[in-house]
Image: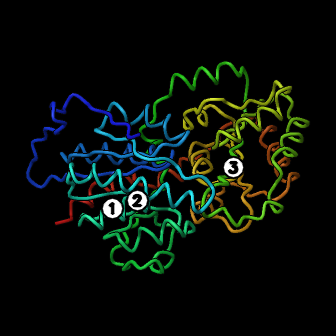
Amino acid sequence: MLLFYKPKHYLAENKYVHAKEENSMKIWIDILTPKQTLFFNGVAEELTKRNHDVFITIRRFRETNALYRRYIQSKYRNYVVGRYGGKELKSKLLASINRMKKLIRIVEEENPDLTISFTSPDAARVSYGLGIRHISVSDTPHAEAASKLSIPLSIRLYTPWVIDKKRWTGYGIDPANIYQYKGLDPIVWINRHRDDPTTMKVINRIQGQYLIIRPIEWMASYQLDTDYNKMVNLHEMVKEIMKIAPELKIIILPRYSIDVKEYKTIYRNNPNVHIPTKPVDGPTLVRYSIGLIGYGGTMTMESALLGKLTITVRPGKQPEYIEYLMDEGVVYQCTKVDEVIEKISEHRDKGYKDIDVSRVLAKMEDPAVYIAKTIEELE
């Protein structure tokens, strides 16, 4: 079933009234993930400031739904379309095909001048098929499946400056069409963030200092070949953290409903370990934490840029944006539980004080502003 949000600007026949100004465009933004919801909320804000008419499509997913309701639903004309396909390749394919069928109907009616997505295969393919220019945004060249299916169909790619253009040209895009912004993606929502009241209630119930653990995105296409034997064991790590820092609460923030159920069963008798049943606002949760241990990328970046103790336990070579933050000394890579414990102990000795990251932030621009400004160069 297609869920459709109809704002006041719609007439009875569902036609949007928009007085198109000179040089303005109608722009379609497609959102697939929680990170993209936060990122494109900022991009949409900047585009509407420049009098562009923005409408948004968003894919159903546990955490994406919650952020959509907070950041998108009441602000922009929007459509909730399709579902996440899960782990299996066939289910991903079928979900994408079904979603594209629904998108075609919406996009034909809206008739946008331009599409922007975070390498959404659905948006890229529909745009290309309907003769609409598509722009990709991405900081994940290691996401090969999404990149292969979207970048060759894109007229332009926006990406952080820490990622070499050569990492992208193999996907079939001319270096001249790669635009690099000097900022990391979480800058977009950190600059615009306001505390979420619902998440503040969760924090207040915890009653004390807390550390966040963000587990791996194990259903993602780029994680399907991951060797989990090389990864720091989460449960062993929790056990050791509680030995050396019994005053800390631990919040485990799973990505999938199936994981929430599993973790709640494992820690049902441990009052110091919290697993939120409903999705929370990540930026709010991180802002009041003492730090984060991440198996992924986005919240790891977010934590570091907010000046929190930030540890990546992702095995092997890190994404370019994490390597950059490691070089700046604001993210630590740990490959063993003992190394994690050592870093937490050091931070505890310093009173769990926030880390000064002002010199790192001073070097960065707002990617949303950069994207909105340079899109105006399109003819």
Residue 204 pos. (x, y %)? 65, 19
Indicate the secondary structure of the residue bearing disc 1.
helix
Query: In the rendered structure, which amino acid carries the disc numbered 3?
Result: Gly
Residue pictured at 77% horizontal, 41% vertical: 347
- Above or below — where is 342 with respect to 182? above
Sequence-first tag of 2 and 3: 2
Question: Is label 1 in contact with label 2 (beta carbons under 8 Å)?
Answer: yes
According to the picture, the residue beneath numbered tag 3 turns out to be 294
Determine the CA span between mark 2 and mark 3. Answer: 29 Å
According to the picture, the residue beneath numbered tag 2 turns out to be 122
Residue pictured at 71% horizontal, 22% vertical: 206
Specify whether 4 is left or right of 65.
left
Residue 33 pos. (x, y %)? 50, 48
Indicate the secondary structure of the residue bearing disc 3.
strand
Residue 45 pos. (x, y %)? 31, 42
| Residue 233 marker | none
Sequence-first tag of 1 and 3: 1
1 vs 3, front mark: 1
Query: In the rendered structure, which amino acid carries the disc numbered 2?
Result: Asp
Pick the residue in front: 256 or 318.
Answer: 256
